[in-house]
Amino acid sequence: MRLSMILPVALLGLVAVGCGGSDTPDPNDPSQQQNQYAGQPGQPGQYNPNQYQQPGQYQPGAQPTTPPPAGTTPPPAGTAPAGGASMGSPATPIAPAAAQAATVVLQGMAASEAPGMQPDGSPFAAQFSEGQVLEQAINIQAGKCYAVIGSGVGIQQLDIQLILHAAPLPPQVLAQSSGQGATAVLGGKASGCWKNPLPVGGPGKVVVKATRGSGLAAAQVYIK
């Protein structure tokens, strides 16, 4: 009688154990592993593309941009810094007769600064604001010696350059005046006339600049 009562109780215990074991997940089941980490960002060893993204950061694949420093304005497209041997805006050409006060001084200076030399072309003159330039085209002849004399009225500092301008090469300064004041001499008696050392000539120009002050000025090229 006791054996008949124990056997049914033992069977009921086995059934209970079997039903309870079915609720325990199998650690080797791939589906159970996938569900275990679903919705749990930041697990060790896993990569989450949004885990380290901060507000304002660019998305993967986008190129970051760096704004210009505050207070700076980028130059307009297609522009470049001004350059060249004769930097400055152009002066207003005038007839040499209108600059007689300057041309008379040129004639007096020629006897002492360019002795034995002849005028190469006519005088040229302009009305200058400070910093403006006057350019006069000349043909630099082979083996010839040059001097340029300039005189200004109302101008405190006048400067002269002799420039070789053989395109497509950039302009090249061959000689320039070094004096102070309203008169300027290039290749005068102090330094001697400037001689073209090349066996061939080429296009050039004389540049007269009102470096300081405003007024009118005239210049003359001499050759021998």
Image (cartoon, helix red, strand yellow):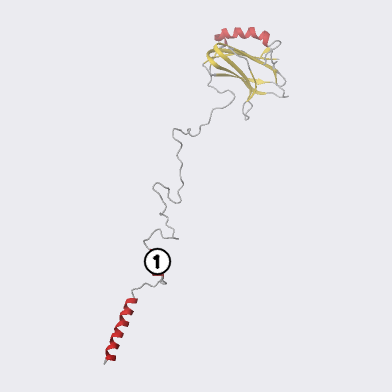
Q: Which quadrant, please, contains the C terminus?
A: top right
Examine the image and state in which quarter residue 149 appears. Answer: top right
Examine the image and state in which quarter residue 158 appears. Answer: top right
Report which residue position mark 1 lands on: 34
Q: Residue at x 27, y 91 (%)?
A: 2
Res 121 visible: no
Examine the image and state in which quarter residue 163 appears. Answer: top right
Q: Amino acid at mark 1?
A: Gln
The image shows residue 194 at horizontal and vertical percentages of: 69, 18
Q: Secondary structure at mark 1?
A: helix
Q: Residue at x 28, y 87 (%)?
A: 8
Q: Which quadrant, please, contains the N terminus?
A: bottom left
Above or below, 161 relative to 24:
above
Res 133 visible: yes
Whether residue 73 sits left or right of residue 195 in the image: it is left
Residue neighbourhood size for the residue with mark 1, other residues' Cα within 10 Å, grouped as few (<14), some (14–19), many (≥20): few
Q: For this rendering, which residue is in front, 45 or 60?
A: 45
The image shows residue 75 at horizontal and vertical percentages of: 48, 32
